[in-house]
Image: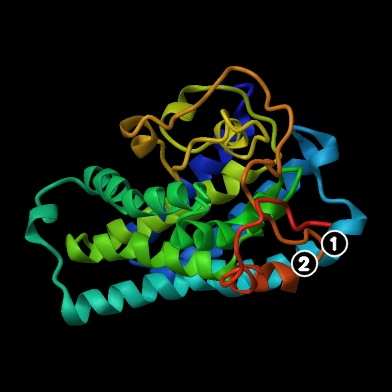
Amino acid sequence: MMKKNYTLYTLLLSVTFLASVTVKSGWHFELMLYLIVVYSAVFIFIFERYRPHRKNWNVKKADWKNELLHLIISTALFDGLGKACALFLVIQLQSQFFQVSDFWLAFPLLFVVVIAAVVAEFLPYWFHRISHQAKSGSPTSLFLWHVHAIHHLPSTMNWFKTNWNHPLGIFINAILKSGPLLLFGFPPAAIFLVWVIHVTMAYVSHSNIESKSSWLDYVVITPQLHRFHHSKKLIEAQNYGISITFWDWVFGTYYNQNRTVEQVGRIQKNHEYPNQNSYWGQIRFPFTKLYQPCCCKSVNK
């Protein structure tokens, strides 16, 4: 198993090492989080070309314009920098208005991080799950799907496709993840490590690196597992966890098979999608659809 997934294990172990040294050495959490984002991105980008899951899933020259817009605006500005700013805001808010609970200080940091990761995933799990419902009779459900739809446009998966997220969705996820951590008084080091898990697994899960089924599939959102979430077959498109699988197990949405997903991309159910070739059209899409009745068709021409 180690031989099949050595690239994935190498990345996770190296990020774990960096995060551990950061905590022990008292380095700047926000800066190190951003550097870990960059490190994970570069690592995956290189190995997608060295050990791709599918060669035809890597970025093609014709796609570079859209990919760079998503990278520069959605990721560098709103996601990578946004996560670092969110972490800074959380730590500042905690120091001014909240208190670190003495309860957590009685336990080893690793135990606290595991609990914090489970707590932090609860609201993002439901936000993600509700975003996929796209119920024609629910304006909230439809709006959330229109925000999220951009993420399920691509018919391939690679590092760049992690960046296909609406800035509004990124912002909401940051609030939903950070809020409970503040309310329950988790220490800053645990909050930092939860964010490290989040950003690393986000890039890992969408990567085009070769990986096989392993024990990791039952704990975190691996590439093998997340490809089912992006499957064009509705029955396979489950696994709503962002970083870990815990809440999928609890609420019965965990789905995994020891095989390769055939096709990823748009599901032709009652789901509408923006134009795949227009970045700004994708950003405007949720707001242009806000006062329009659902026609239950893809608007991608």
Task: Name the mark on residue 40.
Answer: none
Q: Is residue 38 left or right of residue 198?
A: right
What residue would you read off at disc 2? Answer: 68
User: Residue 293, percent across and down?
Assistant: 60, 63
Coloring applied to the structure: rainbow
- Residue 153 versus residue 108: which sits nearer the camera? 153
Q: Quadrant of the N terminus?
A: top right
Local SS, label 1: helix
Local SS, label 2: helix
Tell me the crowding category of disc 2: few under 14, some 14 to 19, or many 20 or more residues within 10 angstroms, Cα based: some
User: Residue 224, percent across and down?
Assistant: 60, 30
- Residue 76 versus residue 180: which sits nearer the camera? 180
User: Hey, which residue is sitting farthest right in the picture?
Assistant: 62
Compute the Cα span from label 1 to label 2. Answer: 6 Å
Which of the 4 quarters of the picture holds residue 167?
Answer: bottom right
User: Residue 270, percent across and down?
Assistant: 62, 46
Q: Is residue 66 left or right of residue 229?
A: right
User: Hey, which residue is sitting farthest bottom in the picture?
Assistant: 96
Residue lying at 23% horizontally and 42% vertically, measured from the top left: 111
What residue would you read off at disc 1? Answer: 64
- Total marks shown come to 2
* Residue 17 seen anywhere in this rendered image of the structure: no
* Residue 58 seen anywhere in this rendered image of the structure: yes
What amino acid is found at the position of numbered circle 1 in the picture? Trp
Q: Is residue 292 left or right of residue 50?
A: left
Tell me the crowding category of disc 1: few under 14, some 14 to 19, or many 20 or more residues within 10 angstroms, Cα based: few
Residue lying at 23% horizontally and 66% vertically, measured from the top left: 182
User: Residue 288, percent across and down?
Assistant: 64, 73
What amino acid is found at the position of numbered circle 2 in the picture? Leu
Residue lying at 88% horizontally and 51% vertically, measured from the top left: 60
Instruction: Determine contact: label 1, label 2, CB under 8 Å.
Output: yes
